[in-house]
Amino acid sequence: MKKYKSVILLWKYIIKDKKYKFKFIILFLLMILSIFADIVSIGAIIPFLGALTNPDILLQKEWFKIFVEIFKINSENDLIFKITILFILVALSASLIKLLLLYFNSKISAELGIELKSKIFEKTLCQSYEYHISHNSSELISLVTEKINRVIQSGILHVLMFFTSFFSALAIIFTLICINTIVAIIAFFVLGGGYILIGYLVRKKILKNGEVIKSNQPKAVKLLQEGLGGIRDIIIDNNQLIFISNYKKIASKIEYANMNNMLLSSMPKSIMEGLGITLIAALAYYLKVIEGNEQVLPILGALALGAQKLLPILQQMFTSWSFINAGLPLIEEVIEHLNLNQTVCFDNKEDKLSFKKDIKLKNISFSYDSKKLVLDNINLIIKKGQKVGFIGKTGSGKSTLIDIIMGLLKPKSGEIFIDDVLLDDYKIKLWQKNIAHVPQFIFLSDASIAENIAFGIPKEKIDMEKVIESAKKAALHDFIESLPNKYNTFVGERGVQLSGGQRQRIGIARALYKNAEVIVLDEATSALDNETEKSVMKSINKLNKNLTILMIAHRLSTLEECDVIYRLENGRIIETINDKKGLI
C-alpha cells in the first residue's frame, strides 16, 4: 500500500472538493447496478439454455412455476419465445448500464483533469520569481501539458476503471459459485492467478518505463523550445539536422517506453483467451464424464458467458493496474506541485501602496546559493520623480538590485521602506501595483497591438481611449494609425512583424496603460541601434515628470538624462554620479 501512497494522496486531494462527492455517489450506484446486471445476465443463461434444450425439466422445477404464472406461459413454443425476449432484454439492459457507467467514469475523469490542470498551472504561476529562475521552464511546461495528461489517465481514469472492474469480477465469480462451486473456484484460480502471475513478472519493467517517460519528457520540450526559439540562428548555421537528431533520440526513449507499457498491458489478453478456451473444454469433460451431470450444457453456457464477461474485465483490471504503476513517478511529481504554497498569489482588492516620497533600501544583502553575495550591504534612497541609472559590468548585481526593488526577490537581510512603510510579504503585492517593467526583450503575445498594450486585460474590458493615450505618450500612435488594421493589427508570434524600436515602445505604452508610478527599464534599449535608441529614449524622457524611472544600461549615453547614476561592482555601490559632465 505504501507503494501507492501518491495515488491515495491524489484522491484525498480530489475528494476534499464537495462538488465531486455527489458525483461519486452516482458513480457508486451505477457500479452496484452494473454488478447486479452482470449477476442477472449470467444467471439468466441457465433457464434460457434449459428452455432450448429440455423445456420439460425446466417446467417441472418449483422455482420456475412463478415465472410461468407471471408471464402466462401455456406451451413450449410460448416458453421459448418469452424467455428469449426476456434474456435479450436483460442482456441489452446490462450493456446500457455499462455504457452509462463508462460515460460517468469518463466524464468525471475529464472534469477532474480540467481541475488538476488548472490547479497545477495556478500553483506554478503563483510561485515566487526565485522559484521560477531556479527551475527550467521546459520542466514546468512538460508538467502542465504532457505529464498531467498522463496523471489524469493513470491516476484518475484507470483507478476508477480498476475498481469498477474489480467489483464486477467479484460479482461474476460469486454468481458462478452459486451455479457450480468447484467450476467457479477452478476458473477463478486459473484465470485470476494467470493475471496475478503476469503482473508480478512485469511490474518492475512497467515502473522503469514510467521513470524513463518522466525524465525524458522535459528534455523533449526543452529541445522543441530551443529549436523553435532559435530558428534564425539554426537556419543560418545550418544546424537543423543536429536538433532533429537530438530530438529523435529523446522521442525514441519516450515512445519505446510507451510502446513497451502498451505491449505489457495488452499481452495477457492473448495468453488468457487460449487458456480460457482450454479451461472450458476441460470443465466440460469434468462435468460430463467425472460428475455425470446431465445439465452440462446450461452450466457450460453460464460458464462460457461468465468467462466471456470475466476475461475482458480481468484484462481491464490488468491494463489499469499497468497504467497506474507506469504513472506513479508522474503522480508523485504532481502531488509535490499540488502541495506547493502559493507564495505570490492572493486576491487583493486594496488600492496600490501609497508612494509620494521615496524608496529606501537599508543594509540589503542577497545571494542565490548562500555561497556568494550578489548584493552586499546596499544602502540607497530613491526619491519620487527621479530618473535613476544603474551601470556596471555583467554580474555586478544591477538586475538583482532592481528585482529586489520590484519585490520579485526577497533580500536575505536588510529592509525596504516605501514612504517609511516597511515592505513585507503582504505589502509587496500592493507595491507592485505601482510598478511597470520594460525589459530588453519585450514579451508580446500573438494578438493585436491593443491587446498587447493592455496586456493581461480581457479583450472586452480594454479601455481603447486609454490605449490610444498610452500609445501617444510612447510615440507609437502615428505608426499604428499608418497600419491597415490600426490598433487591431496582429503583431505575430513574439512580435516578429515589428521592429525592435516598435516593440520597446509597446512595452513603454504597456507601462503607461498600467498607470504605473515607477517604470523600470532593464537594458530596454541595449538591443537597439544608436538612432533607434535615441528615438526611444526621447519618448521616455518626455514622460510625466512625476514618474520615477529606474534604468539599467551598459551605454552611458543611455543615462545622460538621469538625475543620478549608481555604479555597481561585486554587489556594492562603488560610485555615485550626480554630475555627468565629461562622463558621457
Image (cartoon, rainbow, N blue to C red):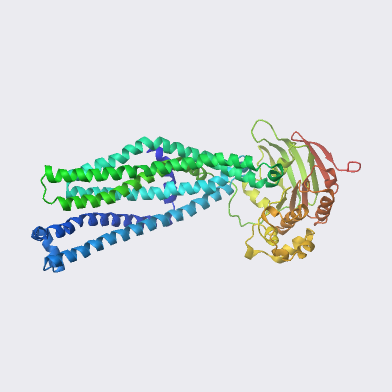
In the rendered image of this protein, does residue 189 appear above or below residue 47? Answer: above
Near-viewer residue (438 or 242): 242
Q: Measured from the top left, where is residue 385 in percent x and y?
A: 79, 52
Instruction: Tell me: 447 left or right of 155.
Output: right
| Quarter in which the C terminus is drawn | top right
Q: Measured from the top left, where is residue 207 in percent x and y?
A: 43, 38
Q: Measured from the top left, where is residue 399 in percent x and y?
A: 72, 42
In the rendered image of this protein, does residue 346 appear above or below residue 87? Answer: above
| Quarter in which the N terminus is drawn | top left
Q: Residue placed at 28% from the left, 59% from the top? A: 94
Q: Can you name the residue that lies furthest to the left here?
A: 60
Near-viewer residue (347 or 381): 347
Q: Measured from the top left, where is residue 71 in percent x and y?
A: 16, 68
Q: Residue placed at 50% from the left, 48% from the top? A: 148
Q: Residue placed at 52% from the left, 40% from the top? A: 252
User: What is the count of numbered marks?
Assistant: 0
Q: Say if residue 133 shows up in the picture.
A: no
Instruction: Tell me: 161 left or right of 462.
Output: left
Q: Say if residue 462 shows up in the picture.
A: yes
Instruction: Tell me: 343 left or right of 56.
Output: right
The quadrant holding residue 274 is: top left
In the rendered image of this protein, does residue 325 appear above or below residue 543? Answer: above
Q: Can you name the residue that lies furthest to the right here?
A: 582
The quadrant holding residue 405 is: top right
